[in-house]
């Protein structure tokens, strides 16, 4: 990122986005995390697909299974802005880079954002492939995306209105507190013990900084985790990135169906 304010840079990215997609305003943004990419086609017809690197302020995606594309999708009377990947904190590009997509979505007109991720679960009943609503978070990065003395309220950060709507659509949806570690290593079993002690149910390496930036920008936030593995030390097996991606692929149809039913009601 350069000397420019991240908010100005997001305005510029939104202007370019409108030019490249031919869509003047977007309504709802979605960020697809690990395991969610195959769900994209259930959202509706893509009217444009661009590379994030064609917009000011974005850099190339770094992790296998994450592709640096943004789609504009027409769904009913809505324009969805779908990020097929995200920049993670562990990439070391800085916090402004992590939340640039969120700020661009806000500048593009989005009033709500759906943040999805793949994560580890602490409840044994959440088998790999279980979607869980994020009810709240604990941000263990020790960082904030907000610049300056802007004391943003995070009460009801993960909209209780949107969570209730999701449970109307799918009554079996459970919810839990998402804990973000910096990564990119997974947790130790002792750290998972700490997560349990502080009230966490889901562990991952994304989402919390984006949710804070979204709230700062005035967007309503829906967070949905796809539990792809039991958290470290709970299964007796080591964690493996390939297996995590495979659990996502196996759950793709169900996640696509879920998003396809939820998004029109946001
Ligand atoms: I997918 O078990 C996925 N991402 N920190 N821990 C953390 N991140 C994850 C995990 C996990 N699974």
Image: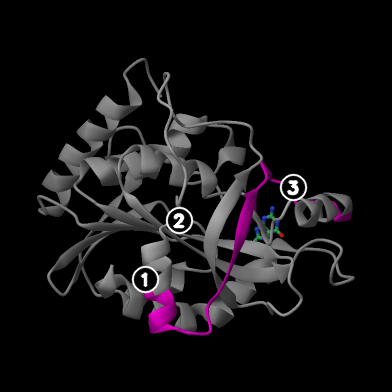
What's the distance in space between the residues labelled 2 and 3, CA to CA? 26 Å
Disc 1 residue crowd, few under 14, some 14–19, many 20+, Cα 10 Å:
many
Q: Where is residue 101 in the image (x, y as percent from the top left)?
A: 36, 43
What's the distance in space between the residues labelled 1 and 3, CA to CA? 28 Å
Please state, as top left, top right, bottom left or bottom right, where the N terminus lies in the image: top left
Q: Which mark is residue 40?
A: 1
Q: Position of residue 86 (x, y in %)?
A: 46, 49
- Give the residue number, with chain letter if any, for mark 2: 158
Magenta residues (range): 165-189
The answer to whether one can see residue 59 in this image is no
The quarter of the rendering in which ligand 1 is drawn is bottom right
Q: Which circle's residue, 1 or 2, is located before the other in the chain?
A: 1
Horizontal side, residue 109 vs residue 85: left or right: left
Horizontal side, residue 207 vs residue 10: left or right: right
What's the distance in space between the residues labelled 1 and 2, CA to CA? 22 Å
Q: Does the residue labelled 1 lie within 8 Å of ligand 1?
A: no
Q: Does the residue labelled 2 lie within 8 Å of ligand 1?
A: no
């Amino acid at each position: 990122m350069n000397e420019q304010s991240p908010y100005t840079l997001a305005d510029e990215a939104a202007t370019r986005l409108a030019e490249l997609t031919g869509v003047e305003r977007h309504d709802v943004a979605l960020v697809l995390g690990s395991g969610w990419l195959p769900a994209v086609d259930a959202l509706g017809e893509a009217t444009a697909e661009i590379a994030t690197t064609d917009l000011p302020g974005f850099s190339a995606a770094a992790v296998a299974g994450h592709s640096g594309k943004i789609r504009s999708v027409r769904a009913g009377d809505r324009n969805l802005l779908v990020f097929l990947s995200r920049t993670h904190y562990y990439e070391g590009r800085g916090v402004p880079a992590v939340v640039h997509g969120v700020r661009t979505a806000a500048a593009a007109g989005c009033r709500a954002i759906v943040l999805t991720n793949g994560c580890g679960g602490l409840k044994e009943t959440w088998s790999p492939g279980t979607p869980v609503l994020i009810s709240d978070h604990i941000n263990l990065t020790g960082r904030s995306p907000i610049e300056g003395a802007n004391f943003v309220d995070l009460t009801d950060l993960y909209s209780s209105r949107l969570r209730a709507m999701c449970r109307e659509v799918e009554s079996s949806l459970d919810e839990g507190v998402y804990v973000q570690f910096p990564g990119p290593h997974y947790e130790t079993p002792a750290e998972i013990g700490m997560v349990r002690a502080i009230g966490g149910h889901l562990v991952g390496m994304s989402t919390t900084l984006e949710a804070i930036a979204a709230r700062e920008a005035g967007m309503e936030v829906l967070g949905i985790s796809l539990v792809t593995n039991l958290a470290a030390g709970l299964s007796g097996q080591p964690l493996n990135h390939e297996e995590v991606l495979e659990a996502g692929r196996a759950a793709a149809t169900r996640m696509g169906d879920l998003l396809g039913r939820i998004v029109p009601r946001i």
